[in-house]
Amino acid sequence: MKGGLFAQLRVKLPALIPPPPRFTRALMSQDVSPHPAPLSPSNDTPKTLAESAYLQLRQDIVTGKHAPGSKLRVEHLKALYRVGAGTLREALLLLVTDALVTVQGQRGFRVAPISLDDFEDITRVRTLLETEALLLSMQHGDDAWESEAVAAFHRLTLVEARLEQADVGFDEWETQNRAFHDSLLAACPSLWLRHFLSMLYQQSERYRRLVLFDAPVPRNVHAEHEALLNAALQRDTKTARQLITQHIQATLTAIRSLPASRFPT
């Protein structure tokens, strides 16, 4: 029998909670997140002061609070994040391994720059890795995996409705969006795929936020999510491969439409 329990039932949650009409315009630039948890996920509970500073800094870099290319001065940041200089340097070095921060010898730390060429490279690699991770997850997923994917999509749909009513902000949507895509890849057995996709997701979000509300390219993100969920539940590898590729590439198309001035040097 092709697919599992939910594939047989063809669950259509959007029929129960229709996507808000303006929601898809506000989030036209969104793409599928791979594995990793949101920037402040439940499984990212900090165990040390350095980890706490790392998570806060990572959030602020990805969301643009610290602009691409800007200098990260330890003396200023230790007061902002309420940690010592040594702890802060440890956090910054962790961000260097994430490719979100660069270190310039004795000149200190800077937020990693952004460019169209960089995002094209990120998109190309993400497409390759995320497709493989999704297909592996579909191959190994069981009924519990299916039920969690459906539940995660339902939670995301609820947040979409609340976002339309301005009851929640974009960060809450991002959290549920990432949780949904995390659930799709949860059965992927490769920890290395998950690790690299986590880094690529963070990099992608920096660019995605550039076009959050500019809506340069028409897009129905909710419908894309629904189609991807159904393909995964049906174990339709050909359709899933096509959808995940289109989903990721759509953000690149939007980024390419931006003026050069949106990429600070």
Image (cartoon, rainbow, N blue to C red):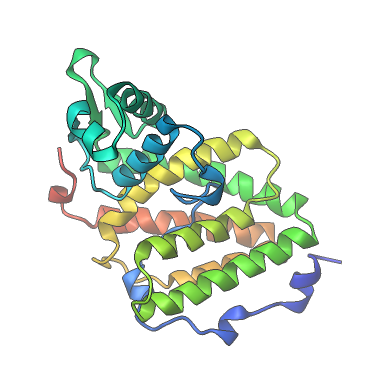
User: What residue occupies the far right of the structure in this picture?
Assistant: 1
Residue at left offset 23%, top offset 39%: 80
Name the foreground residue: 69 vs 116.
69
Q: Does residue 27 appear to the left or right of 258 in the view shown? A: right
Residue at left offset 50%, top offset 68%: 224
Return the x and y of residue 6 as percentages of the image width and height.
75, 71
Q: Is residue 125 visible?
A: no
Q: Does residue 90 appear to the left or right of 18 in the view shown? A: left
Residue at left offset 75%, top offset 54%: 141
Where 22 falls versus 187 (above or below)? Answer: below
Return the x and y of residue 262 as percentages of the image width and height.
17, 50
Name the foreground residue: 168 vs 181.
168
Where 199 falls versus 107 (above or below)? Answer: below
Q: How many marks?
A: 0
Name the foreground residue: 22 vs 124.
22
Q: Is residue 257 visible?
A: yes
Return the x and y of residue 176 as percentages of the image width and height.
50, 62
Q: Does residue 84 appear to the left or right of 14 in the view shown? A: left
Q: Does residue 99 appear to the left or right of 32 in the view shown? A: left
In the rendered image, which quarter contains the N terminus? Answer: bottom right
In the rendered image, which quarter contains the C terminus? Answer: top left
User: What residue occupies the far top of the structure in this picture?
Assistant: 106
Return the x and y of residue 62 as percentages of the image width and height.
33, 46
Name the foreground residue: 238 vs 71.
71
Residue at left offset 50%, top offset 50%: 41
User: What residue occupies the far left of the structure in this picture?
Assistant: 261
